[in-house]
Image: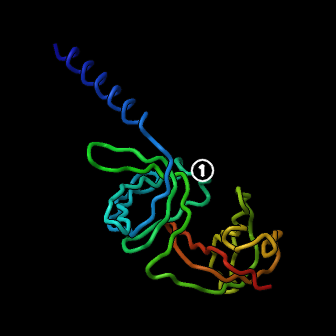
Amino acid sequence: MKKSILKNSILSLIIISVVSCSSMKTATVSGKVSVIQKGKDGYTATIENTKGRIYLGTISIPNLSNPQLFKQAEIGDTIVVKGDVWKMGKEKQITVREILELKQKNVAEAKITGTVQSIEKGKDGYTAKIKTTEGTSYFAVISIPNLGSPGKFREFKIGEKVTLFGEIWKMGNDNRITVRKILD
């Protein structure tokens, strides 16, 4: 008897999932982050747009089209995301595939100077590990979209000394900088 109930419950859950997922569409959602729920590979952000609509945005490294562009939003930040929009009951959900923009409420901008320690290629650029003259390490996200145009983009070599300007943020214990200008 219990096995039959369990099988029927699982089958019902699968059917509901298939029906729910079949009505997905790709959309862009923008708004202010009001709640953050931490998860295993990312987080869920409650995003409220200017019309008062609320979306629950699942932002996780495996779901992103380019995992290197993962960014941690905080409550009060403004975010623009693109992904698969669907409903679960009355709640609007978005499985985020791209973080198009993240404006942090307290963005710290800084200039760093250091030596390139390593380089990891990405879709639109690369991430360079920079060790500053003070001994602090930063993972510098250097990409054409973040710099604003292909003419401003430059590839560095390991051992090269660089000066960069951009937004400083943290991912776990790692210091990061989204590079907006290459200064040397």
Compared to 148, does 108 lie above or below? Answer: below
Image coordinates for residue 67, horizontal then vertical, percent = 59, 54
Q: Residue at x 51, y 72 (%)?
A: 170
Q: Callout 1, which amino acid?
A: Ser
The residue lying toward the viewer, choosing from 143 and 135, is 143
The quadrant the C terminus occupies is bottom right
Image coordinates for residue 116, horizontal then vertical, percent = 76, 73
The quadrant the N terminus occupies is top left
Provide the secondary structure element on which disc 1 rests: loop
Compared to 62, does 12 lie above or below? Answer: above
Q: Residues within 10 Å of mark 1 (few under 14, many from 20)?
A: some
Q: Residue at x 78, y 76 (%)?
A: 152
Image coordinates for residue 139, horizontal then vertical, percent = 64, 70
Q: Residue at x 55, y 69 (%)?
A: 174
- Total numbered badges shown on the rendered structure: 1
Horizontal side of 31 relative to 148 (left or right) equals left
Image coordinates for residue 159, horizontal then vertical, percent = 82, 73
**Extreme-left residue of the structure:** 1
Q: Residue at x 62, y 73 (%)?
A: 178
Q: Which residue is mark 1?
A: 65
The residue lying toward the viewer, choosing from 98 and 114, is 98
Compared to 101, does 96 lie above or below? Answer: above
Compared to 112, does 100 lie above or below? Answer: above
Horizontal side of 142 relative to 84 (left or right) equals right
The residue lying toward the viewer, choosing from 132 and 106, is 106
Q: How is the image coloured?
A: rainbow
Horizontal side of 58 relative to 91 (left or right) equals right
The residue lying toward the viewer, choosing from 138 and 146, is 146
Locate residue 47: give its quadrant. Answer: bottom left
